[in-house]
Image (cartoon, coloured by chain):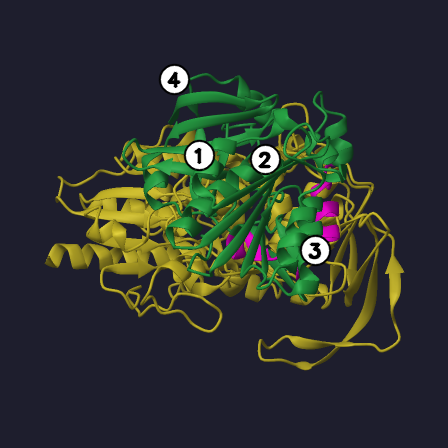
Amino acid sequence: MHKIILKKQLSADVYMLKVYAPLIAEERSPGQFIILQLDSDFGERIPLTIADADTEQGTITLIFQVVGKTTIRLAALNEGEVIANLVGPLGKPTHIEKFGHVVCVGGGIGVAPLHSIVQGMKKAGNRITVIMGARNKELLILEDEMRALADELILCTDDGSYGRKGLVTAPLKELCEQTPPPDLAVAIGPPIMMKFCAETTRPYKVHTMVSLNTIMVDGTGMCGGCRVTVGDETKFVCVDGPEFDGHLVDFDNMMQRLKSYKSQEQQAPHPCKLDQQIENKNQ
Amino acid sequence: MSAHRTPEQIQQDAASRLEQILQREEPLKPKERMAIPVQEMPSQDPQIRRANMEEVAVGYFPEQAKLESMRCLQCKTAPCIKGCPVGIDIPGFLAAAAEGNFQSAIAIIKQSSLLPQVCGRVCPQETQCQELCTVGKSLKDVNQAVSIGRVERYVADWEREHGAQPPSVKPPSGRRVAVVGSGPASITVAADVRREGHDVTIFEAFHKPGGVLLYGIPEFRLPKAIVKKEIESLQAMGVEIKTNFVIGRTRKLLDLMAKDGYDAIFIGTGAGLPKFMNIEGENLVGVFSANEYLTRSNLMRAYDRERAETPIFKSKKVAVLGGGNVAMDSARTAVRLGAEEVHLVYRRTEVEMPARVEEVGHAKEEGVIFHLLENAKRILGNEYGLVTGMECVRYELGEPDASGRRRPVEIKGSEFVIEVDTVIVAIGNESNPLIRQTTPGLDVNKWGNITVNDDGRTSLPGVFAGGDIVLGAATVILAMGEGRRAAASINKMLAGK
């Protein structure tokens, strides 16, 4: 059983939980995720990225957006309560080395998984530019944490309520146009954002890594529900990923697959906000 | 197709026949034994069971168990035993069952097999013990062989209903064994090793133990209550079970020995990586691996749409690719989830189908439409990425291939399209790469299966493996047999330490 040690609301529907999971805290690396389930008999299993870990406290930090049944119930749990099932760390760790100049782009809740990657990249001696985007100021998360890590921080909001007005792809393009261009781009956020980040960097041949969050059941390669088309190949996000070359990912197919159960979930009492997010091209 | 006989009719017939036999003074002659008709497995009416998840085969009545056991000729050579991967004394337990001594029958089985309730239900007996049965051979029909599996199931269920005692455990040895995975191979190893007094911990990646018995085989073929009982029996012996624990991720395999103090490890993680056809359209919405489809329905209970939070695709027309038990399970699950049409597409003929004959029969009774000598060529979709159809091509049988089965050959120009909204790919599994990727020095073959010697030892000292991770996708009983062998060598190694 995994006890919730700390709970914080980061924005209207984004929460942070510190959860006691000493083994996962010890083994996890940047880029990895967990799967949790709140009810062993009828609960669904959902993947969430590990935003941070504290090996001394034996905790991992989860940041999630309330998007459906399980995250609504998760957000209703309080400090001292437990998460019935939590398994991880899953997925391959991020490939971290000294690349030089790394641009890390985070959109919406994607800033959470990006955080541990920025930590790792910084530690490896990279110069880091972080670009963070959200619909408005209220929805920006982890600004202070990122400011502490990044050599340069660029904030964007769709409505101009904070930082630059516009999409994250604009500053990304400017950085690509510089000489020399960045050595690596990392983009994590809604699929549509990752797609356009990849399209932005493609002409400049800046290698762009994306981290995918797809439908999963087991998270260990057993079901194949998470499969995506990468180049000419089918890959499983859970064991081959979650990180892939953004220039090779078929995002359109991925977005269609994310909506596999849309018609069914619309009949459920809680409309799935992930769908809105997939369709919201402004994010 | 013959009309469905109700369990009551079946029991009445069996009872009156048994009474006639019991009134006789002299013992049955072999010819008379063979004249007893094969006892039909009572089952739920196909029209009713299409809409429920309950077990299809309801099990023999005691009269049937006795009658069927009397059909055994007690051959001195006992060819049936050679067909059993774990070498159960089949004539021995049938003789006891024929006398109505079910307690002693189950005791005989349990000397060799740990999971008779499971194996009695899911073993492909017609290609194992029953294939070699003299009665079947004399009557020139394997379906006329003694129904060994059905009697096995009866006596195993009888024991469960009468309160089975967990096996006794020797005093603590101070040795510790880690078992990775909780399917049939691992359950067997855990029990056999624990019996010798060693501490045993099972590590399971899912939130519930049981492996393929839980996530793969549907309730209507293997009730989950039975799997739960088997697991509880392990726990009663003192086996510890850690769920939500992925060896290779939560802990590296070798850390179990280096950091956590285990003296030996058994890897029984199964063949858990679904194969796909590698055809166009396979990543469209509505294409699933059988693993995913069955796991959603079985482990995650998505068939219970009211209560389960895990969704499962709502299908009108389903195509299942494959001819094994998993294909049958998928097709029959789709029927129960309300699909209007379920097509099973297999590129050979029914003779070559690896599925159990009983499951093929059940699938047909439930209205699954069989497409033999056909195969999928590509899957068609619309602008939303949803499956709209499947292009198939016809085959004919050519020369026998390496497996001895006649090779299916594509008939050029025979393409046609069937309209479906769902495609379930059930063409087998490969080995899961997680452990081999995270365990340096662990030798695997070109298919990624862990290589072991005759004792189940891997290339790493103290590490053993068995079941589908060694065999490739096989059966419950073979996994169990492998487990027994590995457990024996673990026990031998620990005794010598």
- In the image, residue A274 lies at what x, y percent? 68, 34
Chain-order first, disc 3 or disc 4: 4
Q: Are marks 2 and 4 on the same chain?
A: yes
- For the record, the magenta segment spans A239-261
Chain-order first, disc 1 or disc 3: 1
Q: Nearer the viewer, mark 2 or mark 1?
A: 2
User: SS class of the residue under badge 2?
Assistant: helix
Q: Amino acid at mark 3?
A: Thr
Check if residue B25 falls in the magenta segment.
no
- How far separated are the C-alphas under marks 2 and 3? 21 Å
Query: Which residue in the protein does label 2 denote?
Result: A109
Chain-order first, disc 4 or disc 1: 4
Q: What is the chain identity of the residue bearing mark 4?
A: A
The tally of labels here is 4
Chain-order first, disc 2 or disc 1: 1
Q: Check if mark 2's residue and mark 4's residue have beta carbons within 8 Å.
A: no
Instruction: Tell which of A83 and B375 is nearer to you.
Output: A83
Q: Nearer the viewer, mark 4 or mark 1?
A: 4
Query: Which residue in the protein does label 3 denote?
Result: A200
User: SS class of the residue under badge 3?
Assistant: helix
Query: Which residue in the protein does label 1 denote?
Result: A86
Q: Are marks 2 and 3 on the same chain?
A: yes
Q: Residue at x 74, y 49 (%)?
A: B364
Instruction: Tell which of B200 and B275 is nearer to you.
Output: B275
- How far separated are the C-alphas under marks 2 and 4? 25 Å
Q: How crowded is the residue under tag 1: few (<14 C-alpha within 10 Å), some, or many (20+)?
A: many
Q: Amino acid at mark 1?
A: Leu
Q: Nearer the viewer, mark 3 or mark 4?
A: 3
- In the image, residue B464 lies at what x, y percent? 30, 60
Q: Amino acid at mark 4?
A: Gly
